[in-house]
Structures are given as C-alpha cells and as structure tokens.
Amino acid sequence: MTAVSGSAFVIPGGAADPAAPSGGNVYDRRTLEELARAGPPVRQVPVDGEWPDPDAAGRARLAAALADLPDGAPVLVDGLVACGVPDIVVPAAARLRLAVLVHLPLADETGTPPGRASALERGEGTVLRAADLVVATSGHAAQDLARRHGLDPARVHTVEPGSDPAPVAPGTDGSSRLVCVASVTPRKGHDVLVEALAANRGRRWECVCAGPEPADSAFPRQVRRRLGEHGLTGRVRFTGPLERPALDRVYAGADLVLLPSRAETFGMAVAEALARGIPVVASTAGALPATVGRPGDGRAPGLLVPPDDAPALAAAIRRWLEDAALREELRAAARTRRAELRTWQSAARDMAAVLERLAAVGRRPEGAR
C-alpha cells in the first residue's frame, strides 16, 4: 500500500482530536494513521467549523484551505465538511481532483427539520455530482448515494471501516451489563432504548451509555426525563465522551452491546463489540445487518430488530436476559465473527487505492459533473 504523494485529506477540526470520539472522527484519524505508516503521509488538513452549518469564519477557513492546495492535487474531503457548502466546494472541484467521503448523508440525521433536510439533500447532491469520486463506508451506503443523487455507480467506492484487535471482553456476570456506545442523538435511538429497558424493569440489568451529548440539543434531557418517569435513573449511567483507555474499560465490562439506531451507514460500535467477542442487539437500519454479519445461517453473533420499535427491542433484551443457552450461542458466534473482521490496515489499503485512482482521473468537462 502506498498513498499517492501530494494527496490531502480535509477533515473537521475536531477529527484530529482523540477526545472527539465520534465514529466519523475515529474513521478519519485511523485512516490517516495507517496511510502514514505505509508510505508518504497524506497531508492532513483540519478545518474548524460547526459543520455542516459553518459560520462565516468557518466558511472562510475552508475556502482558504482549498485555495492553498495546488491545481490537480488529489484531495479527499470529509462529507461533513464538504456537503453543506456547495458554493465553496464546487468551484474548488473544477481545479482539484476531488473525492468526497460520506459517513452519513446529511439529510439522514434524525430530527433535522424537513425544510433543512431538503436543503442539505440538494447541496449534498450538488457536491457529490461535482466530485470526481465518492467514498461510502459500506456497500449499502454506496448504493444509496448513487440512487438518491443520480451518481454513476462506477464513481462511488466503498471503504468500510476497520477495527483494532482487542482481547476478548470478560464481561461482568455474563448477562446483566448492557452497554450502548453512541452519541446521545435521536438517530442513535436512546429514546427507544429507554422504553425497551422500562419493559424489562423487573429483570436484573444495568446499562452504561457512553458517548457525547450535544449541548445544543434537548434530546439528552428528554431521555433522562423518561428514565426518571420510569424509575430507572439509578440503573442507567451516562459517561459522556470517552477516550480510548476509558472506552476500552467500558467494553471490557460489557455482556451485551446495544445499538438501536434509526439510520446507520456501517455501525462502528458493533464492529468494536464483535472485535472483543461481545454479542450485540442492533436495529436493521441501513448497513447494520451486514456489519453484524452471518444473517440467517444460525450463527449470527447478535439479534436484529426493526428500527424505532421499542417492543421488539424489549423482547430481544428479554430473550438475552432469560435464555442462558441463547447467550452462550451468541457469545460463541461473536468470537467466531471476531476473527473475520477487517483491520484498519485493510481499510487504509482500500483508501490508498481510491487515492491512486483519483490521481489518475482526467479532468471531466463541467457539464459531465
């Protein structure tokens, strides 16, 4: 694997900070690290701003960062930065060899007002059609992007995240420690999780929710209010964002990992759980069934439920808590799946191949974008 000399990767400013633990940030950091280990490092270009809705200062920083890149340079831009500001990115695409990495379509962030979601969808489509290549984080996401934005599927490439090797998690007592690693946002479904846990209040469990809580959102307060109404405040602990050593300790104590998302293009928390041999209960949103793996062959390392379906999630948790044979079956399957997960080195090889292809792209006429 050799990254193309002179390539650049434009990322949100927070992605360079290990204390900013979102899946997209981890993807960006680990990809850059592995590319650097393998050959000439890709130039990291962090741009501060409230993406995808930057203020004037953020917009100016992005415009200056793109203007600083030489004509014809292969440039990968995180979609969180690129897709909300087509007026800045599209002109730059005319002189750069541009690829856009889409972690999640902007309009798919649950809770976005309909008018704003429509505007984000239009802007994202304009940016992706102007780009030379598009990178998605799963095959499911690649197909969705091509369909929704009318892209040539040959220009949409898949680079799935990797996972880091980790020891098998010892868990707590084998059943009762439930863990959800996700930002506390409507898309991740903590409200659904609360109702499912409430339906199992008579059983023995405790739940740890690890992830950032957006300060400008009322959703975390709503989740806590419902916990209080159900009398569950003392049984669910919110840790806030955790850096790697602390997050590793949370995973080590997990008996079951939960991810009841309403939309996912991959589900890195699921892969991190399986890398430790921890079974999962996840929704069927987006790419999650493929990330869990082995659907329908009797050896799946977890249970899948429809998104936004608290009774189905409650039933899956109840099965886990009450059926010792099921727990053993899922643990065995999770340890088998653990050996099948791809590494970040493999992910970086795929990204290097995209950058090589990007460097070889001829400039397309404006009308062909």
Image: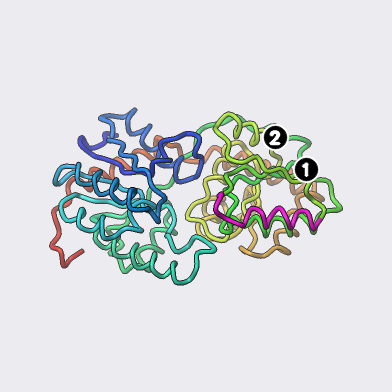
What residue is pinned by disc 2?
A: 253
Q: Is residue 219 magenta?
A: yes
- Residue on which the image places disc 1: 176
- Residues packed near mark 2 inside 10 Å, few (<14), some (14 to 19) or many (20 plus): some
Left or right, 19 with respect to 327, comes to left
- Which one is nearer the viewer's eye here, 56 or 179? 56
Secondary structure under the numbered disc 2 in the rendered image = loop
Residue 188 in the image: above or below residue 66: below
Label 2 amino acid? Gly
Residue at 74% over, 53% down = 317
Q: Is residue 298 magenta?
A: no
Looking at this view, name the residue that lies furthest to the front: 56
Mark 2 or mark 1, which is nearer the start of the sequence?
Answer: 1
The magenta segment: 215-230
Q: Secondary structure at mark 1?
A: loop
**Image: 217 above or below 274:** below
Quadrant in which the C terminus appears: bottom left
Which residue is located at x 56 percent, y 58 percent?
187
Horizontal and vertical percent position of residue 109: 49, 60
Pick the residue in front: 74 or 303.
74
